[in-house]
Image: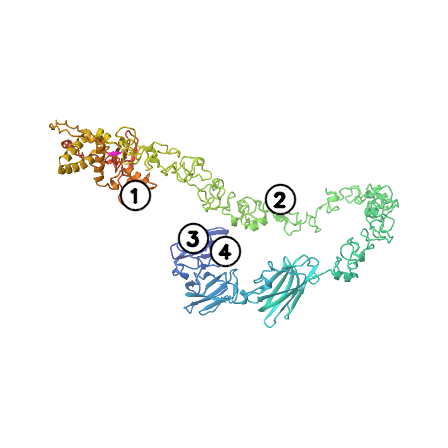
Amino acid sequence: MSNDTGISVGLTSPSNADFDLYLYDSSGNQIDSSLSISSYDSVSANGTSVGGTTVYINVDQWSGSGQYTLQIWIFAITPPPTQNDANTGGDAGDTYSTPTALTGTNATYYGYVDKSTDEFDYYSIPVPSYHRINASVSWNTSSATLHLHLYDSTGQYLPGGQGFNTTSPNVVSSENSSVGGTTVTLMVRAWIGDDDYTLTLEFDNISSAPAYNQNDSGTGDDASDDYNNPTGIIANIGQNDFTGWASNTDDIVDEYAVDVPVDYGIAVSVSFDTGQVNFDIALARMPNPASNIIDTSSGFASPETVTSNGTYVGGDTVLIEIYAYSGEGEYNMTIWIFTLDTDGDGFYDDDEVTCGSDPDDASSVPQDTDADGICDVMDNDDDGDGYDDANDSFPLDNSEWDDTDNDGIGDNSDDDDDGDGWTDTDEYQCGTDPMLYSSQPTDTDADGTCDVVDEDDDGDGYPDNSDAFPLDDQEWLDTDGDLIGDNADIDDDGDGFSDAIEVTCGSDPLNANSLPPDTDQDGSCNAVDGDDDNDGFADVADAFPLDAGEWVDTDDDGIGNNADGDDDGDSVPDTADAFPLDASEWDDNDGDGIGDNADLDDDQDGWSDADEADCQTDSYSSLSIPDDYDGDHVCDRVDPDDDGDGTDDIYDMFPFDATEWEDLDFDGIGNNADTDDDGDTWSDLDEPNCGTDPLDANSFPDDFDGDRICDPLDIDDDNDMVLDINDAFPFDPSETKDTDGDGTGDNADNDDDGDDWPDSVEVLCLTEVLSSTSVPIDTDGDGSCDVIDADDDNDDVGDLNDVFPLDPTEWEDRNGDGLGDNANPLSIIDHMKLNPLMTALMVLVILAAIGGSVAFTMGRRKGQSDESWKDDDYRRYSSPPETAPDWQDTPLPPLSTPSPVPEPPEIEVPGEAWFEDTQESIEAEAEEPSLSDLTVGQLKAMASERGLSGYSKLKKSEIITLLETDPEDEGEPELETDPPPPPPPPKFERQPPPPPPGFGDMANAEPEGPVRAESWEDLPDGGDYVQTEPMQYVGEECGTWVRQDDDSWVKQ
């Protein structure tokens, strides 16, 4: 169907057939049907929106057959206007069970309804506690009429909940009903036409109304309104007073439950102001009080009173119902719990009065023979034998109650109850009444055995069963049955011929058919002649034994068949009568020898005439046979189950297939043959094993990896070739293990063993990436393991040049004494031994100082410069970490022979003490170094002296920051008394110190070296490590880097 279209269908059936017409929607739900017995049927969409969907037309053969004509009309329909009911963007709910929720208070909403296409709009509205709701609907078009209805949470109309005005507006209200704190439902209905409407909601606070301020019988609230679940109150023995409130409109009934003690009764009185309210009251037994009402009071006066009224309610719970018949107001309820046995002797007072004993005297108790708790005076059966005393001959003997013969012996022990001389046992056998004297057994032969049991009553020797005269001992046979025994009868056979004559004629005197006459004159009297008329038919079978021309008269019309044209008298001439001798038959349609009247199947087609009538086939034509698909001999027309599969056709989706009856997924394959009944692509055999319902398309197995093996059965749910029992991540194909158990699989985890060392680093550091106990050694704790750290102790001196690579405070031992120079400074002698040329220069400086004050001053300044230069060890610069190879590529040229220097005059050489004093003075006058000029070791030593902590694993810049922020730092650090340790070897970016005088021409300019990274941490991103010798780091963007012996990396 195209969008915005409707459909009508007409069916014209053949005149001899009855076809029916159905219209279904795309889900198989019936839209319309026509079951007319006329030749024309029609259906339509009937107001159902079918535009843009698929509809199905079904022509169903009810009877007959033939060609039919089907007419289909497709027509345009005007779509309903786009709706925005209550600003929902669509239509409000169309049923009570599917309302649109409104949450506003004192709000106004807008909507639209149409009698033809959208008759109802339902809204659910929560009412605030202790409030009433007032609602109104208004519309503009005078030709339209809209109704407004208000329901409580159970779907019942509220007191003011119906608005039926024909003109706008319609107003409803919950009035004083207790709807606060519940959800009510509003229905806007298009009664006539269509129109936009305005829905206004208002809420009034009615918390002060009596209905919301009840304290019925001290319960603190309203008593129950449900008689099956009443409010329980406690009533003590004696008088109990309670108060309550009820209303004919807001609280029509109060239900109370009271437990009555055993042996007690109850009375209830309710008083009220008759000018305000009228209450009725009822008393009933719980449970099922509606069917166990004890007493009611429904007058128009106060008080209303009920009692247990003779009904025993002790030990039971009773219901007290107070019903507000009209008005509203308070009531006073008095409950009396009173005893039924004042003296406590076990007999109720009323019974004692009746029984004649004293109800106030416990020693005065009624007589009770059978101890059934009912005194004999009130007991209809004193001895409790089940017989009323009035009919009991022994009222105080529970073993006897009758004495039929009045002999003083009860019938139960008397063996002859009626006293007739025959025992009760004999009388039972003889069929007489043992309780009736006049009913005595008959004994014909007086042998003491009654005739009933006597085998020969008359004692003639012939048993009664063969004695024609069982009570006549003179007779025992009566051949002709004339009640005259053969012994006394002269014509035993009663044929009119004496026994003597018949003996003479040769006939049998004991056979009435043996007569002496001889009709055919054959010389044999008829009595003994078997064919009196000699017509060839024995007399006994001859309808005309004395007429030789006739012997049969089938229709008993007195005309023998030979002369009769209609032998059987059925008005059908013998010439046309298939059964001329059977008056009940004349036709045999199927020629089976059974007349049609008696024949149940006239056409011999195996179907009875009655069945064929029901099945509407021709019972006289063997070619007209009822359809019987399942062969159960019940034709399809009347068979409720045509295929005999046990499912009636109206429920059978395959009415002509005995192997199928359901098709849950509508795929045209019945559930029995369908391997997937619900059409969810999962086999019915698989789904139960997978824990899902094979008959629910919304219930299908989980299959994480989509391999068509459901997860409960799949031993590898994520299809990563690792069984789930061995897979730490059975639902993650990218992960199978989690070595450190941190929830991140090893493939994604950059630290598989959780030892805080990345796997890539552990590979470089030569430790096990899957063992948390295998951790790289990192002496300086800088995050770079010693294997790849160019400076293991982080003292800014590469391990290749660090004599103490694992001691951050030491890196040199220039005097070879095995002790670091920082903790054990070099002596002057050590300096002179290590720098002989500098020693000579110092001598020259001293001589220059002696030469003159100016020269001394100049020499002194030169000495300061030389001293600074002197402290550097040439051996360090002979092979610095990053420039030594370049420096060594080009050998230094041989030194030229210096010009001879005139020998200086002999002077007194100062001693070692003088050198020390001189050096100290020079150092004291030197410029104080800044923190950045100090080594890492010096900085750490300074931090230790200041008592700082946490500096051992810091970098140089971080230690400087720590020292600069130290509050004890009053300025620049004081110089140590001892000579400072030698400075660290120069870094790559620093220039080497100038060469000694005379060697300036031999200094090579720093060659332009390759691109270098100090450690693996300085490598650019985007590469991968390659395990070659030496190791390489290769990437498309970063290029190829080769690891050097000092753990630096050089780009190729």
Q: Secondary structure at mark 4?
A: loop
Query: Which is more foreground, mark 1 or mark 3?
Result: 1
Residue 425, compared with residue 241, is above or below; it is: above
- Residue 531 in picture, x, y percent from top left: 75, 42
- Sequence-earlier tag: 3 or 2: 3
**Distance of label 4 from label 2 (alpha carbons):** 44 Å
Q: Which residue extends farthest front? A: 908
> For residue 1047: magenta?
yes
Query: Which secondary structure type mostly characterizes the magenta part of the structure?
Result: loop
Residue corresponding to mark 3: 55
- Residue 708 in picture, x, y percent from top left: 43, 39
- Determine the image quadrant of residue 10: bottom left
Amino acid type of the residue tagged 3 in the rendering: Val
Query: Which is more foreground, mark 4 or mark 3?
Result: 3
Residue corresponding to mark 1: 963
Query: Which is more foreground, mark 3 or mark 2?
Result: 3
Q: Secondary structure at mark 2?
A: loop
Residue corresponding to mark 2: 593
Residue corresponding to mark 4: 35
Q: Report whether 417 appears left or right of 996.
A: right
- Sequence-earlier tag: 4 or 3: 4
Q: Secondary structure at mark 1?
A: helix
- Residue 152 in picture, x, y percent from top left: 51, 62
Amino acid type of the residue tagged 2 in the rendering: Gly
**Distance of label 3 from label 2 (alpha carbons):** 57 Å
Q: Is disc 1 in contact with disc 4, using a CB cutoff of under 8 Å?
A: no
- Sequence-earlier tag: 1 or 3: 3
